[in-house]
Amino acid sequence: MTEVRSAIIPWQECEYVTPRNAARILGLRPGALNDRIGSEELDAMTLPGGRQIVITVESVLRLIKRAEHAQLTARKEAKRQTKARPLRLVVSNQ
């Protein structure tokens, strides 16, 4: 008798993920995920047999890194803008 084993494989170690899992990973709605595929930010393909669409993990990781970089840049810019404004105290004795 053949023994069946199951194991959890982290998505980062896979080559492809389903659109549903990609949406979960990225925190996107399915419609927003489709927009990312349409704008070629995510690489989608149909597996041989033409039944299931998958998204490459490489493109998911690339999108995450791009978002992290944009967020870091926005934080630095916000920090720079708050430092650039001098405070001025105006007192009126009238």
Image: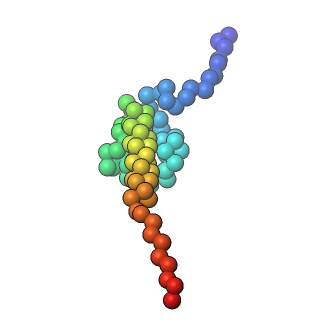
Residue furthest toward the top? 1
- Indicate the quadrant where residue 16 lies: top left
The correct choice, above or below, for 53 with respect to 75 in the image is above
Taking depth in this image into account, of 77 and 59 the one nearest to the observer is 77
Taking depth in this image into account, of 56 and 46 the one nearest to the observer is 56
Q: Position of residue 23 (x, y in %)?
A: 49, 46
Which residue is at a point 48% across and 27% down the rendered structure image?
14
In the rendered structure, the answer to whether residue 9 lies left or right of residue 48 reads right
Which quadrant is home to the N terminus? top right
Taking depth in this image into account, of 70 and 34 the one nearest to the observer is 70
Q: Position of residue 84 (x, y in %)?
A: 39, 58
Which residue is at a point 36% across and 46% down the rendered structure image?
37
Q: How is the image coloured?
A: rainbow
Which residue is at a point 49% across and 50% down the rendered structure image?
28
The answer to whether any part of residue 91 appears in the image is yes
Taking depth in this image into account, of 85 and 56 the one nearest to the observer is 85
The correct choice, above or below, for 19 with respect to 29 in the image is above
Q: Position of residue 53 (x, y in %)?
A: 41, 39
**Number of marks drawn:** 0
Q: Position of residue 38 (x, y in %)?
A: 33, 49
Which residue is at a point 40% across and 54% down the rendered structure image?
80
